[in-house]
Image: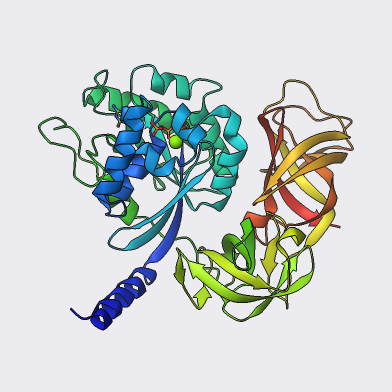
Amino acid sequence: MSNLEENTNEEEKIQESFNKSHINLVFIGHVDAGKSTIAGHIMVLSGKIEKRVLEKFEKEAKQKNRESWKYAFVMDLTDYEREKGKTEEVGKAYFETENRRFTILDAPGHGSFVPNMIGGAAQADVGILIISSRKGEFETGFNKGGQTREHAMLSKIMGIEDLIVVVNKIDDKTVNYSEKRYLKIKQKIRPFLKRLGYDVENRVKFCAISGFTGEGIKIPLDQKKCPWYTGKTLLEELDNLNPPKDLSGESTRMTIIDKYRASGVIAYGKVVSGKLTMNESYLLMPLNRKVTITGMTNQDYPVEEVRSNENAKVKLKGVEDDEFKVGYVLSSIKNPVPVGKRFLAQVNLIQHESIICPGYQAVMHLHSATIECTLSKFLAVVNVKKQSVIEKNPKFMKQHQTVVVKISVPVPICLDIYKNNKQLGIFTLRTMGKTIAIGRVTHIF
Ligand code: GTP
Ligand code: MG
């Protein structure tokens, strides 16, 4: 084949792949459940990682006495992650199935890295909840304080409606492909997810796999070992997912997740609505600076346009890299994203043993932004279902209550009313390493 033919074939393949709908998946679940191992194994099975590279990871894992972590090393890139066998930063990888194209966001499971996990969930359309079926591990993750619970709850809050629950480590010797163990886990998880508000009948799927041996990921579980299993493989479940609603027709908002300098100013982010076009100008908010896109890639391929629900890397003319931050928003000029320092929100105190009073400070995570905030005034305790006021001007707020709160932040941030843009209008509040509340923006001053 000539070089020209090869290039044309390659281009056709890329075009074909971009015609598939794109879905952002966040891998969530308790520490050591096997999130990175599954993500890494998917990359190997879909031909994204060459044998030679996997052999290198295998060697490094062996040297670190972490032989079983070879697939996790596909996702866990830093020295810290490989030494400790723990994900810290949200890892990212791309792959595709017959009908869909995916970005994997491999979240950390350890309790100390929950803010990173929230960042991952904020970018995702679908959650892949990984559960270890190994004796003791399922129990620890599912007990109070376990991350199976916290991650499932936080994902729902961040707007994730579709979940695939992956019962992993089915090969482990304490499990040995047992139907009883699989059913026990399913029977505990289903009602729990239902209580969190997931539509378990229609939008939650279950599948059993071994992330380590690969059984059940692409190749179905062996009927000799698991005659009881009638479910799909993980890749089949993924291929069946409905793509998120296409918001490309709305005003453009790209939340900035990362930025750096590399022969120009580069911003990486998620197009939550609208689209980005090469050589067009946009407003970088809240800086209010007109910038022009002079280069753009999607999954590392140069592209002319990036539609909503896709992630883009853009080269920006008109701004220096030290003039903006993660959490800023690239926005259409005609109808720019709202910006504010004070706003009203319905805040639900999900876990806090003592009462909290006006003046309370917390860290707010809103799309990709993280900022200190003050809950300056409590306006009313409300009943969300009935949309009625229970008490006006309460002196304090206690666990499980929903209160309309006036919130202030020290510098202007990009946000929107939840009703207008879900992803820009929902946030979590954290203090002392714990998520204490969720909120929805109802009014911006
Ligand atoms: P964090 O990122 O720290 O939250 O962990 P993780 O969920 O990414 O888990 P990771 O993939 O790092 O795997 C943890 C350990 O579980 C490693 O030793 C894996 O080899 C092991 N493991 C993962 N999947 C399986 C599996 O299907 N079967 C068995 N037997 N072990 C597995
Ligand atoms: Mg991991």
* Count of residue discs: 0
Image vertical order of residue 345 relative to residue 307, above or below: above
* Residue 51 vertical position relative to residue 248 in the rendered view, above or below: above
Q: Position of residue 390 (x, y in %)?
A: 80, 37
Please, which colouring scheme is shown? rainbow
- In the image, is residue 225 above or below residue 271? above
Position of the C terminus, as image quadrant, is bottom right
Residue 349 percent coordinates (x, y): 71, 33
Q: Is residue 319 left or right of residue 58?
A: right
- Quarter the N terminus occupies: bottom left
The residue positioned farthest toward the left in the image shown: 224
- Quadrant assignment, res 285: bottom right
Task: Confirm whether residue 65 shows in the render.
Answer: yes
User: Which of the four quarters of the rendered structure image does ligand 2 lie in?
Assistant: top left
Q: Nearer the viewer, residue 26 or 45?
A: 45
**Relative to 354, is 303 on the left or the right?**
left
Q: Position of residue 155 (x, y in %)?
A: 54, 42
Q: For residue 8, which quarter of the picture?
A: bottom left
Name the residue located 26 percent from the left edge and 47 percent from the top edge. 52
Displayed quadrant of residue 393:
top right
Could you tell me which residue is drawn at 38 percent across and 37 percent down?
72
Residue 153 drawn at (x, y percent)? 55, 36
The foreground one among 92 and 235 is 92
Q: Nearer the viewer, residue 295 or 210?
A: 295
Q: Residue at x 35, y 28 (%)?
A: 63
Query: Relative to 333, is 184 above or below?
Result: above
Does the image show residue 350? no
Query: Does 87 sit left or right of 315 as displayed?
Result: left
